Image: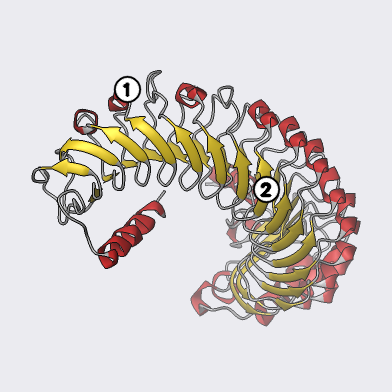
C-alpha cells in the first residue's frame, strides 16, 4: 500500500501542475510534526463543509500519520507541504498560515475569503488552486504578497474590479488563470514583468481597453487566452514576438483593424481564434507560414479580399471563415489539405466553381459549408470520394447541373442542404438519411418525388413556391444544426 501511495503522489502532482483537482497523497509512514499538527487541528475545527461526513472532522481521526490524513502531504520531516480541502464553505482559517512549509494549497466548493496570514508563506507557497469557489469583491491582495508563487488558479469565482497591479511582483509565475470572473477595466501593462508565464487565461471577464503591447512581450507564453471580454483597438503587431505561442484566443471581443502580418512568425501556433470581432482587411498571406495550425476560426468579422494559398497548412483540421466579406475563387490548394475535417466559409462573397475536393485522400472531411456565396458551375464528381461527409451545405449559391450521382455516393450524410440554387433533374435519393436529419433541396429545378425516408424532406420551390414562414423555419433548423459543429 505504501508503494502505491508513492505512485499516487506522483500522479497527483502531475495533475495539479495542469491546474486540475486531486487530493494529494502523503509520504508513507511519516508522522506530522508537532507544530504542524496543532495547526491542522485548528484548521479542522474551524472549517465548515458542505457535506459533514467528508470533512476533516470525520476523516482526520486516525492519528498523525500523514499517510492516513486525506488531502495532506508531508515531507520527510513531517512538515505539511500540501493541503487539499474539498467542500469548504466560508472562509479559510488563519491557521493555514501556521504551516511554514506549505507549498501547495488547493480548496474548492464555496470558499469565500482568504486569511491575511497567508502572507507568512510568501517564500514557500508555490501553487494556489482556488477555482470554482464563491470569492467575491476585489482580487485578494494577500495573493500579491506571495512572491514565490509559480501557479495561480482563481478561475470561476465572482471577483470584481481591476486586475491588481501588484500581481506584477509575482515574477516566478508560470501559470495564471483568472478567467470566468467579473474583472473589469484594462489589462495592466505591468503584467509584462511576468516573463516566466507560459499559460495566461483572462477569458470570460469584463475587461476593456486595448491589448497592451507590453503583454505581448511575454516570450515564454504558450497559451494566451483573453477571449470573451470587451477589448477594443487593433491586434498589436508585437504579437509576432510570441515565438513559443501554440494557442491564441482573442475571439469574442471588439477588436478592429487588420490581422497583422507579423502573425506569420508564430510558427508553433496550433489554434488561432479571432472570430466574433470587428476585424477588417485581407487575410495576410503570412498566415500560410503557420505550418503547425490545427484550428483556424476567423468567422464573424469583416475580412475581405481573396483567400490566400493555404496549401502549406498540412496539419489543418478546422477552417472557419464564415460571415465575412471574402471574395474571389476558392483556392485549389484547399483540396490538398488532407487532414481537414471542417470547412465553413459560408456567408461570404466567393465566386467561381468548386475545387475538386477529396482528390488526395481527404478522408477526414465531415463538414463542408459553403452556403450563401456566389459559387457557380457543377458539383465536382470528386466530391463523391468524400465518404466521411456528414454535413453538406451548398445552399444559396448559383450552382447547377444534376447532383444526384454525387450525392447518393456519400454513405454517411446526415444533413444535406442544396436549396436556392439552379440544380436540375430528379430529386436525389439519399438512402442514408432518416427521420432525425435535415434534407433541404427547395428552390431548385428538381422534379419527381423525394425518394428518401425522412420526417419532412423539403422540396418546396421545385414544383411550386413555399411560404416565407416555411423558409424561415427551415433556416432556423439549419442554424440550430450548424451550432453542433
Q: Which callout, 1 or 2, points to the residue nearer the camera?
A: 2
Distance, label 1 to label 2, CA atoms, is 34 Å
Question: Is 106 drawn above or below residue 115 in the view shown?
Answer: above
Residue found 17% across the figure and 42% down from its top: 446
Q: Is residue 256 left or right of residue 460?
A: right
The residue singled out by tag 2 in the image is 280
Q: Badge 1 local density, few (<14 within 10 Å), some, or many (20+)?
A: some
Residue found 49% across the figure and 34% down from its top: 317
Q: Is residue 196 visible?
A: no
Q: Is residue 344 visible?
A: yes
Q: Is residue 427 left or right of residue 261?
A: left
The residue singled out by tag 1 in the image is 382
- Taking depth in this image into account, of 139 and 345 the one nearest to the observer is 345
> Number of labelled discs?
2
Residue found 40% across the figure and 29% down from its top: 354
The percent position of residue 2, horizontal first and vertical second, equals 57, 46
Q: Is residue 388 left or right of residue 171?
A: left
Quarter occupied by residue 208: bottom right
State which tag comes first along the sequence, 1 or 2: 2
Element under disc 2: strand
Q: What is the number of the mark on residue 461?
A: none
The percent position of residue 347, horizontal first and vertical second, equals 47, 48
- Taking depth in this image into account, of 223 and 370 the one nearest to the observer is 370
- Taking depth in this image into account, of 5 and 378 the one nearest to the observer is 378
The percent position of residue 55, horizontal first and vertical second, equals 56, 74
Question: Is 57 drawn above or below residue 75 in the view shown?
Answer: below
Quarter occupied by residue 127: bottom right
Q: Badge 2 local density, few (<14 within 10 Å), some, or many (20+)?
A: some
Amino acid at each position: 500500500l505504501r508503494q502505491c501511495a508513492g505512485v499516487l503522489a506522483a500522479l497527483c502532482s502531475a495533475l495539479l501542475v495542469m491546474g486540475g483537482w486531486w487530493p494529494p497523497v502523503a509520504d508513507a509512514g511519516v508522522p506530522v510534526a508537532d507544530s504542524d499538527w496543532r495547526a491542522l487541528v485548528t484548521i479542522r475545527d474551524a472549517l465548515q463543509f458542505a457535506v459533514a461526513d467528508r470533512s476533516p472532522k470525520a476523516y482526520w481521526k486516525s492519528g498523525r500519520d500523514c499517510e492516513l490524513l486525506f488531502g495532506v502531504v508531508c515531507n520527510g520531516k513531517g512538515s505539511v507541504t500540501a493541503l487539499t480541502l474539498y467542500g469548504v464553505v466560508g472562509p479559510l482559517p488563519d491557521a493555514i498560515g501556521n504551516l511554514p512549509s506549505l507549498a501547495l494549497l488547493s480548496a474548492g466548493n464555496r470558499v469565500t475569503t482568504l486569511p491575511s496570514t497567508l502572507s507568512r508563506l510568501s517564500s514557500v507557497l508555490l501553487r494556489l488552486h482556488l477555482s470554482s469557489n464563491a470569492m467575491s469583491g476585489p482580487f485578494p491582495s494577500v495573493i500579491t504578497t506571495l512572491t514565490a508563487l509559480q501557479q495561480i488558479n482563481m478561475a470561476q469565482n465572482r471577483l470584481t474590479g481591476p486586475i491588481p497591479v501588484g500581481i506584477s511582483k509575482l515574477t516566478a509565475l508560470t501559470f495564471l488563470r483568472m478567467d470566468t470572473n467579473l474583472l473589469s477595466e484594462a489589462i495592466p501593462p505591468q503584467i509584462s514583468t511576468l516573463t516566466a508565464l507560459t499559460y495566461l487565461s483572462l477569458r470570460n471577464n469584463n475587461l476593456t481597453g486595448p491589448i497592451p503591447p507590453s503583454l505581448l512581450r511575454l516570450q515564454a507564453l504558450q497559451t494566451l487566452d483573453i477571449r470573451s471580454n470587451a477589448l477594443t483597438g487593433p491586434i498589436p503587431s508585437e504579437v509576432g514576438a510570441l515565438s513559443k505561442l501554440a494557442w491564441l484566443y482573442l475571439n469574442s471581443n471588439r477588436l478592429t483593424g487588420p490581422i497583422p502580418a507579423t502573425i506569420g512568425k508564430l510558427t508553433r501556433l496550433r489554434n488561432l481564434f479571432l472570430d466574433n470581432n470587428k476585424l477588417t482587411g485581407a487575410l495576410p498571406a503570412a498566415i500560410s507560414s503557420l505550418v503547425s495550425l490545427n484550428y483556424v476560426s476567423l468567422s464573424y468579422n469583416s475580412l475581405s479580399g481573396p483567400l490566400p494559398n493555404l496549401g502549406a497548412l498540412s496539419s489543418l483540421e478546422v477552417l472557419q471563415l464564415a460571415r465575412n466579406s471574402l471574395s474571389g475563387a476558392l483556392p485549389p490548394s484547399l483540396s490538398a489539405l488532407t487532414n481537414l475535417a471542417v470547412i465553413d466559409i459560408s456567408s461570404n462573397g466567393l465566386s467561381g466553381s468548386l475545387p475538386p475536393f477529396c482528390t488526395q485522400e481527404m478522408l477526414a472531411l465531415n463538414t463542408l459549408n459553403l452556403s450563401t456565396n456566389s459559387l457557380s458551375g457543377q458539383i465536382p464528381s470528386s466530391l463523391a470520394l468524400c465518404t466521411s461527409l456528414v454535413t453538406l451545405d451548398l445552399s444559396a449559391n448559383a450552382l447547377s447541373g444534376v447532383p444526384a450521382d454525387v450525392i447518393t455516393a456519400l454513405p454517411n450524410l446526415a444533413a444535406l442542404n442544396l436549396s436556392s440554387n439552379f440544380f436540375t433533374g430528379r430529386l436525389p435519393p439519399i438512402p442514408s438519411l432518416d427521420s432525425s436529419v435535415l434534407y433541404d433541396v427547395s428552390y431548385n429545378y428538381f422534379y419527381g418525388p423525394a425518394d428518401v425516408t425522412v420526417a419532412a424532406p423539403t422540396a418546396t420551390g421545385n414544383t411550386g413556391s413555399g411560404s416565407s414562414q416555411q423558409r424561415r423555419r427551415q433556416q432556423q433548423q439549419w442554424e440550430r444544426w450548424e451550432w453542433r459543429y
